[in-house]
Amino acid sequence: MKFNILSFYVRRLFSSNKEFLDDLHRITKLYPQNEKLYKLAFVHSSASLKLPDGTHINNERLEFLGDAILDAIVAEYLYKTFPNKPEGFLTETRAKIVNGESLAHLAITLGINKYIVSHAYHFKTNKNILEDAFEAMIGALYLDQGYRKTRQFVVNRLIAKYIDINLVLKTENNYKSKLLEWGHQKNVEIVFNTLVVDKDERPLHFSSELEIDGAPKASGYGTSKKEAEQDAARQFLTIING
């Protein structure tokens, strides 16, 4: 721990962006080591960086990793917090906590939106770009600090401070979770086939086709994979609920 603290302040001393490192420390209460990794977490695909070998990099890979890590941490937290609740309750509650609106709000609350690099229109208030940057930051934190410290940040700094669990439990807006619970009760297989509509368009747009037991039932659209799947689930639930 002492080595990480000393290393952080040495890196900060020679960094050209001390404010960025100070903000990371303020947000996480940890001592970031890999400044470049965190900077990459805030590079949207519309502003991808070109490497000498011609490849382009952005925060999409870190967002993919951060999404999985965040899901695992929140799942563990809920499993321990609600020891007598069934799987359906845990799945739905997790989805409410890590939904796009919530993560975008956290990105603004923590102040990471000012570090996002993007060529998209109104990117500092774009829900999907904010959500992706937040998840990418979680991915960077995991690679830089490990699972234990990332969990510490999510549980102690985010959930405890910014998430009202009682309010979350009262919120009923996660159509995908409701659909998955319905599918579990009906013992049917639910699959979302989600694709990018146009890879050259920014922001990206996604199409999701909902299949139940192999048969197409509804389609959804959105500017993120999660949004498209939520829309497809909402369309189907509207049909079956009249």
Image (cartoon, grey):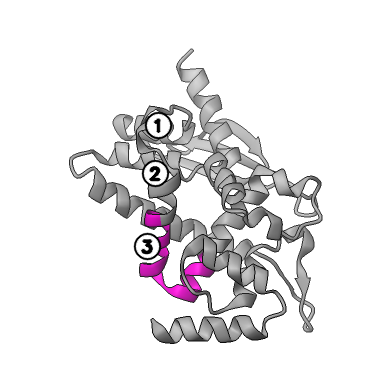
Horizontal side, residue 184 vs residue 238: left or right: left
- In the rendered image, which quarter contains the N terminus? bottom left
Name the kind of residue labelled 1 in the image. Answer: Leu
Residue in view at x 40 percent, y 34 percent: 168
State whether residue 209 is above or below residue 18.
above
Magenta stretch: dominant SS? helix
Q: Position of residue 135 (x, y in %)?
A: 55, 57
Name the kind of residue labelled 2 in the image. Answer: Arg
Front of the two marks 2 and 3: 3
State whether residue 112 is above or below residue 195.
below
Q: Are marks 1 and 2 in contact (CB under 8 Å)?
A: no
- Tell me if I can see residue 65 in this picture: no
Bin the neighbour count of mark 3 within 10 Å (Cα to Cα): few under 14, some 14-19, many 20 and up: some
Which of marks 3 and 2 precedes in the sequence? Answer: 2
The magenta segment is 139-156
Number of the label disc, if any, that sits on residue 94: 2
